[in-house]
Image (cartoon, helix red, strand yellow):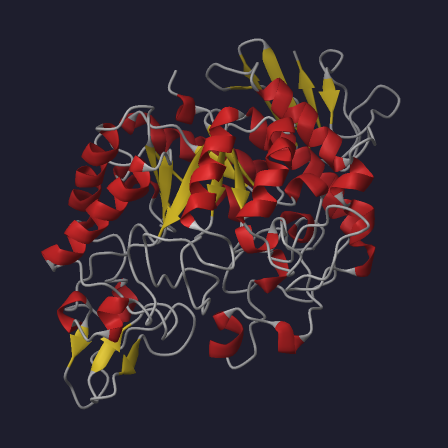
Amino acid sequence: MSWWRNASIYQVYLRSFADGNGDGVGDLAGLRTKLPHIASLGFDAIWLNPWYPSPLADGGYDVADYRDIEPVFGTLADAEELIADAHGLGIRIIIDLVPNHCSDQHPWFRNGLWDRFHVRDTEDLPNDWKSRFGGPAWSRLPDGRWYLHLYAAEQPDFNWENPVVEQEFEDILRFWLDRGVDGFRIDVADGLVKDFGKPDADLPYSDQDGVHEIYRKWRKIVDSYDGERILVGEMWLPDPVRFARYLRPDEMHSAFNFDFLCCPWNAGELRGVVDSTLAAHEPVGAPPTWVLSNHDVTRHVTRYGREKTGFSFADRQHGAPTDFELGTRRARAAIMLTAALPGGVYVYQGEELGLWEVEDLPDELREDPVWHRSGFTDRGRDGCRVPLPWSSQDGPSWLPQPENWHRFSVEAQADDPDSMLSLYRQVFARRREIDGALEWLDLGEDVLAFRRNSHTCVVNLSDRPIDLPAAPALTSIPLTGGQLPPDAAAWLF
């Protein structure tokens, strides 16, 4: 089986992962020293958020140069050494590619090569399109014309109708493939083609049919390299059938399954998402991917401890009451559910430590453009990007850690058999033994239970302990009187 069809992939937000030179910012040197940590968890690959030179108007998704490394993180040589080190441990490297937009400091924008962007010469706003970070999607150039930016004003959108743009990104793909990267996570993969004849309500900048031809060309490029290099899409689409079109055999290999991430902690709704996901992927022969958190969303330890346990960008529930003990308990069960499902799984850095959303950051330290463009009403995504605690001796970091995070550090959890870290190591070590199609079992209305060949996964989402059909090989928390407690999971081999 191709490695990517059931891969376990660890997401590294480089700026917040590990600081190798003591300046408070994560970097490639820090990541290289922590590769054994990722290897000890049993992951097949690392996905790195953008590592390119950037003014960091949007956490690195405003790219100024697609063929180099942000100096704060290191050098191109450091990146090549990281790839070599990771490969030596059997870990592949997937990097972020941002083809919808760049930085306003990109040479094309600075030099006024306007045919490579969407520029309009009108007196009023060219149309009613809105930025996904708030406010209009148009800003003025110094000469009074307007340019399109679906995100921050510092992120002008590329004009993919210009073949120069298309050729540029094909060359960028080859540049990194030549350096040994194993794949690309494609940011805003649905957004490259726009229909300017439609209003904002029709989402004319998302999922236009013409975008698929771009990825067919990209697929031919990655397939021309050895080692099974891959394309992974980021598309927030409401229609699972249209979502699956990106995963046809001549397009992307896989894409993030955000319906699962957004789903509340509810047995019926989770089963519905699993069923619809598997059904949408089956006709195109693509593996689903399962993910609980990432660098854009509220960490699931926090979400699962709230009355409303789902996720929505429209209501991030900042400051809502949270039962962290309950959220942690559910998070332990959730990773066992996630890792047992068919397909691939992504884990965001810090999940293995049970970290929560840091919602009390000082406002003056917030950097997310959502905070600023919302008129300081949406606190944005900084709370899930606070640097990881490695030990009680960690120095200051670009976003401050909560005072008690040292108790959740890698050092504090490493030798504790009951820690979240220990659970993750056990889960991903045993995950390699699981294969086969999913067959649901009936163990009660509020219980998720399924079999995959000789492996059975049971998740108790009810409010009372339940009996198990056999003795478990692994549980998220200890059994109570031989029964599986509420908000707990068990694996039976």
Residue 228: % across, % down: 33, 25
Q: Classify residue 306 by image quadrant.
A: bottom right
Direction front: furthest residue: 77
The reply to whether residue 293 is in sight is no
The residue shown at (37%, 68%) is 151
Side (left or right) of 475 relative to 110: right
Left or right, 327 with respect to 366, comes to: right
Residue placed most toward the observer, 489 or 3:
3
Instruction: Please identify the residue farthest to the right as the structure is shown.
Output: 481
Taking the image as shown, residue 404 lies to the left or right of residue 110, namely right
* 92, 484: nearer the viewer: 92
Q: Quadrant of the C terminus?
A: top right
Q: Eyeballing the image, is 492 above or below 405?
A: above
Question: Where is residue 339 shown, x and y percent of the image?
Answer: 57, 28
- Picture layout, residue 162 above or below residue 226: below
In depth, the one of 87 and 160 nearer the eye is 87
Q: Quadrant of residue 98?
A: bottom left
| The one of 236 and 370 positioned closer to us in this rendering | 370
Residue 207 in the image, given as x and y percentages of width and height: 26, 52
